[in-house]
Image: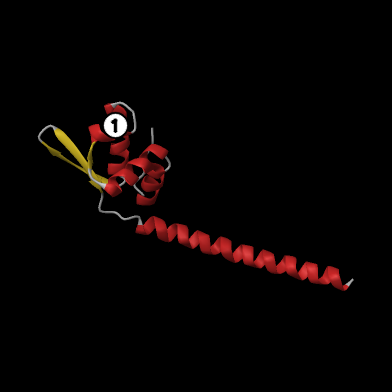
C-alpha cells in the first residue's frame, strides 16, 4: 500500500506510480464515474478500486461525492501544476547536460580529425 507523506508532490507521485490509478485519472478526464463503474472497467473488486480511489483522493487528484448509494468520482481540484513544474525543471537540467556533453564530443571529434 502506498504510504502518503504530507508533501503534496510525494503524495501525487506515489499515486501516479500505479498504472491502474493513472488509468482511473485518464478515465475521469473523459467523464465522471462511480467507483462501481471504475471497478468494472478495470476488472477489479469494488474494495480494490476503493483503495485506488482513496489514494488518488488523498493526493488531491480525485474527489468523490456520495449521492444516495452511489459514490461518484471526479477529477480533483489539483491540476498537477506543481508536479509539471518539478518535472520541467529536471527536463531542462538534463537537456543542458546533454547539450554540454554533445559539445565535448564534437570538440573531441574535431581534435581527432586534426591529428
Tell which residue pokes out farthest to the left in this image.
Answer: 68
**Quadrant hosting residue 69:** top left
Given residues 25 and 82, the one toward you in this image is 25
Residue neighbourhood size for the residue with mark 1, other residues' Cα within 10 Å, grouped as few (<14), some (14–19), many (≥20): some
Q: Could you tell me residue 100's position as x and y percent? A: 65, 67
Given residues 76 and 36, the one toward you in this image is 36
Count up the numbered dots: 1
Q: Could you tell me residue 18's position as x and y percent? A: 41, 39
* Residue at position x 74%, y 69% in the image: 106
- Helix, strand or loop under label 1: helix
Q: Is residue 4 visible?
A: no
* Residue at position x 68%, y 64% in the image: 101
**Quadrant hosting residue 36:** top left
Tell which residue pokes out farthest to the right in this image.
Answer: 115
Q: Could you tell me residue 5's position as x and y percent? A: 36, 44
Position of residue 110 relative to residue 80, above or below, is below
Position of residue 94 relative to residue 69, above or below, is below
Tell which residue pokes out farthest to the bottom in this image.
Answer: 114
Q: What's the image's color scheme?
A: secondary structure
Quadrant occupied by the C terminus: bottom right
Q: Could you tell me residue 44's position as x and y percent? A: 33, 28
Q: Is residue 75 visible?
A: yes
Is 113 placed left or right of 25 in the picture?
Answer: right
Is 47 placed left or right of 10 in the picture?
Answer: left
* Residue at position x 35%, y 50% in the image: 8
* Residue at position x 27%, y 28% in the image: 46
Quadrant occupied by the N terminus: top left
Position of residue 88 relative to residue 27, above or below, is below
Residue under pointer 1: 39
Amino acid at each position: 500500500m502506498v504510504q502518503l507523506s504530507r508533501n503534496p508532490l510525494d503524495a501525487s507521485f506515489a499515486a501516479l506510480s500505479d498504472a491502474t490509478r493513472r488509468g482511473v485519472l485518464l478515465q475521469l478526464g473523459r467523464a465522471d464515474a462511480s467507483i462501481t463503474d471504475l471497478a468494472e472497467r478495470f476488472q477489479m473488486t469494488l474494495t480494490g478500486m476503493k483503495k485506488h480511489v482513496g489514494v488518488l483522493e488523498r493526493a488531491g487528484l480525485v474527489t468523490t461525492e456520495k449521492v444516495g448509494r452511489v459514490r461518484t468520482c471526479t477529477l480533483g481540484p489539483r491540476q498537477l501544476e506543481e508536479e509539471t513544474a518539478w518535472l520541467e525543471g529536471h527536463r531542462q537540467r538534463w537537456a543542458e547536460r546533454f547539450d554540454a556533453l554533445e559539445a565535448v564530443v564534437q570538440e573531441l571529434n574535431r581534435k581527432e580529425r586534426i591529428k
